[in-house]
Image (cartoon, rainbow, N blue to C red):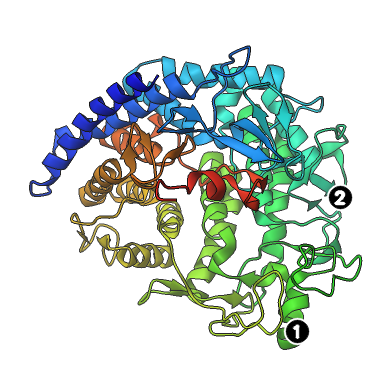
Amino acid sequence: MRSKATAVTAFLAIIVGAASAVAEEPYAYPVEERDEQRLEAVRAYADNVLEYGRDRYGDEHTPLFADGLNVDAMEAVRWKYDGNEWVISNMANQQNLFRVFTGLTQLTGEAKYEEAAKEAIAHMFEHHRSDCGLLYWGGHQFIDLETGNNHGEFDADCHEFKWNFPYYELMWEVDPEATERFLKALWNTHVRDWGRLEMNRHGSFGREMGDLWDNEFEDPEPFFEGTALTFINAGSDLIYGAASLYALAGDEDALEWGLRLAEQYVNARHPETNLGVYQYSQPKRRGDPPEDPDHPRFTYSTYGDRAQRQFGPEFGDIALEGNFLRGDRGIYSRNAIIQLQLAEELGDAGEELLEWTREGMRAYAEYAYIPERNALRPLWTDGTDLTGFEIQRPGYFGSEGQVIEEQTASLIFFHSYALGYRLTEDEVLWDMARGVAEGHDLGDMGERPGEGVDVNLDTSAHDPVAVFALVDLYRATGHEDYLNLARRIGDNIVEQRFHDGFFLPSADHYNASFDAVEPLALLTIDAALRGEPEAVPQYNGGRGYIHGRFDDRGRTTDSSAIYSRTREE
């Protein structure tokens, strides 16, 4: 096993070495050698995943994939809990991998990549589906490849999606009936009260199918009290699922409910600022919290709205969980990306969704963004600036004495605002996209699109999210400098994140996640160069994760417990 890995590493060293040699030359385009090297890196990665990442554990080997690999041992990563070790296979954590496989097949004509993804999906549908149609995947559930058993006892043992955004188009190609049933079960299990559209991130695998779209909607007032948590990270997955059901099956009732859910977040926006919310309900108080602020249950929503408990004495009625904006909490980044893409796909049926999203993004750019520092103000949705506020009591949003600070606007805002500009031509969105890009040393995208462009081709930036933004700007304007900068960042990705045949945060990391976004970014560049952007599935802001108890780490995520590890530890 190790001899094969060594051979692969030697082969890859040639690719990366060649890339480094080319990079020593003055940076200019076109250079076909660099373009070929990026595609070859993705092909080598995909071949390694096919060889080392598929199930080779237990008595029966299946078409399923592990979530990631220890590149030193060439063995699958494991979740450790209560003395057990499980070989993780969580297909919700492999959706970017499947998009890479599809894109690679489209660009190279080699069917083996997409076929491998389809075989895994078919196996999942056949062997790891609950009676109601839900798959055993998500934030609190995975399959152990050594036994083939589902596991969730390490945490909530339920179905959870938060910004997952699966590749439903490919699932539909494999099994339309099973995909439709899953999407309906997704809504059925996560919506607790259809009249108020009270939904929650947690859903039961055993919940029987109810009336679904035939339920009556009561159009509730924003911030009603409830026992569920209408977080936008979970709501976005429901909106995406309903719109996907319309796009794939023509289900108009599903789309109506999906848009209805999206509108609940719009209705809860502050009427003066138009700033959006993280949730449109507030937790109902069902008891008194523990007196000890260090108690693990102290910050639970069981004891009422956590922002009101922590900030109410200082800020009054505006102090609700839904109204607290620190770093946007995904509203104008991941939620904006998926809603913008859905609006484009839906065409006329998505016009309202597009306008809602544009209006919210404009408000956030006006109230939160500080271009001279590429920073985001922490806010209440009424526009109150929380920068420098010292927290007076412990709680969900920080410890006593902690000072709330500005946050840097990350490159995901470059992606969301560039995409927003491409679809709306709104100059306010352009200005923020431009500011975020300049704040990350990418140069000047231009005072106006394609005008006065001065990109930084000497940048060391290697965040794949920037690639998607730049390709959107290229598609919007046709200006070659945006695509050339994307190529430069792609080259940096190969040089700085491609190690041992896999994509890793650095050469010191040794656990590679197969949900890596880097190879999808490299394929996106290649497709743009060919003038065939539709050949590669779009990155939609989705991410995979596992959240639960891990031996010696407490309650944590796979990102922290597994993929953050370095050889220096």
Residue drawn at 71 percent across, 77 percent down = 394
Residue drawn at 60 percent across, 22 percent down = 121
Residue drawn at 82 percent across, 24 percent down = 131
Task: Judge left or right: residue 509 versus residue 179.
Answer: left
Instruction: Give the residue at mark 1.
Output: 316
Question: Looking at this view, is 413 or 532 the one in front?
Answer: 413
Q: CA distance from mark 1 to mark 2?
A: 28 Å
The spot of residue 338 in percent (x, y) is 55, 47
Q: Is residue 220 above or below residue 178?
A: below
Task: Judge left or right: residue 532 versus residue 333.
Answer: left
Task: Judge left or right: residue 216 versus residue 556.
Answer: right
Asked if the residue under mark 2 is in contact with the one under mark 1, i.e. CB atoms within 8 Å, the reply is no
Mark 2 neighbour class, 10 Å CA radius: few under 14, some 14 to 19, many 20 or more: some
The spot of residue 76 in percent (x, y) is 52, 29
Q: Is residue 544 above or below residue 448?
A: above
The spot of residue 341 in percent (x, y) is 51, 45
